[in-house]
Amino acid sequence: MAGRLSINESLWVCGGRRVQEILYPRAETAALRARGARVFPLDESKGENGIEELRRLLWNSDVHVVLMWLYPYQIKSLYPILRERKNFSIVLDDWWFCPPWFTREAEHIIFRFYNGIAVRTGLAPFVTTEPPWLGNPDNTLSSLYGKSAALLRLPALAAWPFVDAFKWVQRQREAIRPGRLLYMPLPVIPESLPLKGEKVEYDFSLTGSTVGVWLMRDAYASFKHTFANLYCDRQRLLNLIVPFDGNPFRVYDWRRQPGGQSPKSWDDYTRITRQSRYVISTGGLHNAGLPKYLEYACLGVPMIGSKTPFEFPWLDDCLFEMDAMRLNSGNIKPLLDEAIERWPVLQANCLKWRDQLFKQHDTYRLWDMLQSQADGQPIPPEYLRAGVGKTPRA
């Protein structure tokens, strides 16, 4: 049936390089193939030949296509193929920078982060705390993209009212049918998160980025936030903690390490995490249910930062909540002392939840959950906070 999402019968078009190089795409495509689904890796090295190969494959076929693990420019390259054919769905993680034609025309939009569903159904705005209009990148924007984003922040603000007026028109053209909005969080790969007897070296650590800047393409993400640092809450929290390094706490701040780069390898990332009492973790000012929450908990390390408003109800047991945007140098120290006192309980909670999270976020189980949603079933309650996900399925 054209438009019906059947995981096993659909053709899954994925970014070839991402599948080869990144853990999550590799695990998910392996599970798809084990289910008997067809996976088409879009090979960048083939250039236009790769697009033409896909075009020939779809030319005389009515198979439902699902786009997954593609960069925006790769998604846009598929527009000539899907423009008239359509009959496709799309899986989105950072959904706010997806080209809007694809979210408007997709049969189903499959969100990794529930904030995408919350924004489209009016449950919450995209950003709940406004970022600074101009931010300090902490010298971490070393890439060409990062430098360009910093330079273009002011022009983006100047263009914001005009672009948002056009986005309003785009929203009127996108029919919000809750039944086409599906949720599938990222999996947890147990063998990638081993428990080891590391000696605790740090009281508070940062192993993630302090800068998150994007071009806001989606009709439901205001252009005002284009190239704004939506991870400035992490940056602010770390900046408030660092002055206490050596008196009385021990702090790991990758920005002060040689080269000023976050852990390069997965092994370094997991090792430094295990060597920490707490790791800083937030979903950014856009409240995304990021996989780092799961990774940290499954490594047996509690978090300090902000909770997710939609996903991960178990997080209440594993995170010491601190709102970085409401703290200052005069009121943070007592909270850090309290966090250290509570650490043994929160660490035990992480270890208690570890096996359950492995089960809930097993790759195969998540594919089954997605299929049940496509067939009209609700999201199982263990994945969402109480009261979330009650939107009618019609």
Image: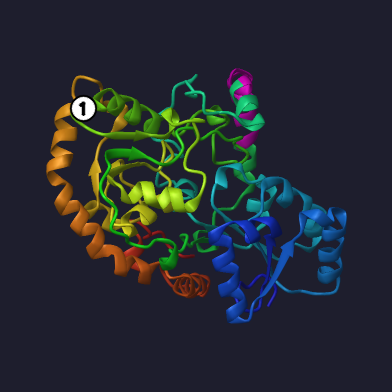
Give the main secondary structure, helix, strand or loop, of the magenta stretch. Answer: helix
Q: Give the range drawn in magenta.
A: 151-167
* Horizontal side, residue 229 vs residue 156: left or right: left
* Horizontal side, residue 222 vs residue 347: left or right: right
The residue drawn where x is 53% and y is 30% is: 225
**Within 10 Å of the Cα at label 1, are there few (<14), some (14-19), or many (20+) other Cα atoms?**
some
The residue drawn where x is 77% and y is 74% is: 62
- Badge 1 marks a residue whose secondary structure is loop
* Horizontal side, residue 323 vs residue 157: left or right: left
Residue 297: x and y, percent? 31, 56
Residue 217: x and y, percent? 63, 39
Against 276, residue 18 (above or below) is below
Q: Can residue 31 be seen in this view?
A: yes
Q: Can residue 387 be seen in this view?
A: no
Q: What residue type is labelled 1?
A: Ile
Against 197, residue 206 (above or below) is above
Q: In which quarter of the image is the N terminus?
A: bottom right
Front residue of this view, candidates 170 and 45: 45
Q: Does the magenta stretch include residue 374?
A: no
Q: In the rendered image, which quarter is residue 163 located in?
A: top right
Q: Mark 1 points at which residue?
A: 332
Q: Is residue 164 magenta?
A: yes
Front residue of this view, candidates 270 and 323: 270
